[in-house]
C-alpha cells in the first residue's frame, strides 16, 4: 500500500470553525481512519503541533516557499504532492492510496449521494435553475 501524508494548517484555533471547514475536517478524519483500517499508512501533521515535520520535508518547505501557507493542506502520496490548498475527495484519496476498484466504487457512490443531499440535486437534472416565473429556461437571458 501507499504512504499518505497530510500537512495541515493550524485549523480552528479560536474554537469556532466555518461549518464547511469543520465538515471537511470530520470527513477527512473518518477517511483517515477508514484507510488505516485497510492497511494504508496515513500520517497527519499540523503546522502548530508538528513544525519539525514541516521543516524536515524538502517538498513541504519548497511548496510553502513558492506558494505560501495557502498551499496547506498538502496531500502527499509516496513523496509526491497530489493536492494543494484543499483536501481531496474521498474517491481521489482512496485511488491515490491504491485501494482496489471495488472499494473505489463505494467511495464514488458515497460522494454521489453526498452531493445529492448537499446540493439538492436529484436523479433528474432540471432544465434550468432560474427562479423567475417568466424565465424561458435559457439562464443566460434571465436577469
Image (spheres, rainbow, N blue to C red):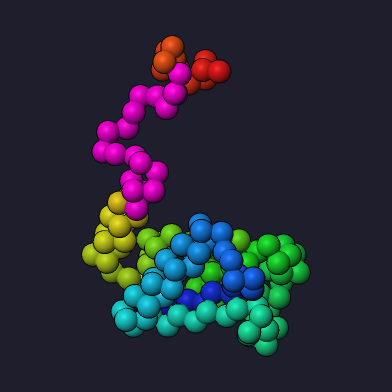
Judged left or right of residue 108, residue 19 is right
Location of residue 118 in the rendering, given as x and y in whole percent from the top left corner: 39, 48
In depth, the one of 58 and 131 nearer the eye is: 131
The secondary structure that most of the magenta stretch takes on is: loop
Q: Position of residue 15 (x, y in %)?
A: 59, 71
Quadrant for the C terminus in the image: top right
Residue at point 64%, 71% (across, down): 14
Left of 109 or right of it: where is 79?
Answer: right
Farthest left residue? 102
Q: Residue at x 58, y 66 (%)?
A: 16
Q: Locate residue 91: give its quadrant.
A: bottom left
| 45 w.r.t. 143: above or below | below
Asked whether residue 13 appears in the rendered view, the answer is: yes
Q: Is residue 142 above or below residue 4?
A: above
> Quadrant of the image for the N terminus?
bottom left
Residue 52 lies in the magenta-colored region: no
Q: Is residue 48 above or below residue 9?
A: below
> The magenta stretch spans which residues?
114-132
Indicate the position of residue 55 as horizontal and vertical percent values. 70, 83
Residue 11 visible in image: no
Q: Position of residue 13 (x, y in %)?
A: 64, 73
The residue shown at (41%, 15%) is 133
Amino acid at each position: 500500500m501507499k504512504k499518505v501524508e497530510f500537512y495541515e494548517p493550524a485549523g480552528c484555533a479560536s474554537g469556532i470553525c466555518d461549518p464547511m471547514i469543520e465538515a471537511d475536517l470530520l470527513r477527512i478524519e473518518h477517511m483517515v481512519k477508514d484507510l488505516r483500517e485497510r492497511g494504508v499508512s496515513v500520517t497527519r501533521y499540523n503546522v502548530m503541533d508538528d513544525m519539525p515535520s514541516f521543516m524536515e520535508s524538502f517538498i513541504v518547505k519548497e511548496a510553502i516557499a513558492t506558494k505560501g501557507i495557502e498551499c496547506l493542506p498538502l496531500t502527499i502520496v509516496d513523496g509526491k504532492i497530489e493536492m494543494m490548498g484543499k483536501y481531496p475527495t474521498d474517491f481521489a484519496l482512496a485511488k491515490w492510496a491504491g485501494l482496489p476498484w471495488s472499494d473505489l466504487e463505494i467511495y464514488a457512490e458515497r460522494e454521489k449521494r453526498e452531493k445529492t443531499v448537499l446540493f439538492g440535486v436529484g436523479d433528474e437534472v432540471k432544465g434550468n435553475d432560474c427562479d423567475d416565473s417568466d424565465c424561458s429556461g435559457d439562464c443566460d437571458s434571465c436577469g
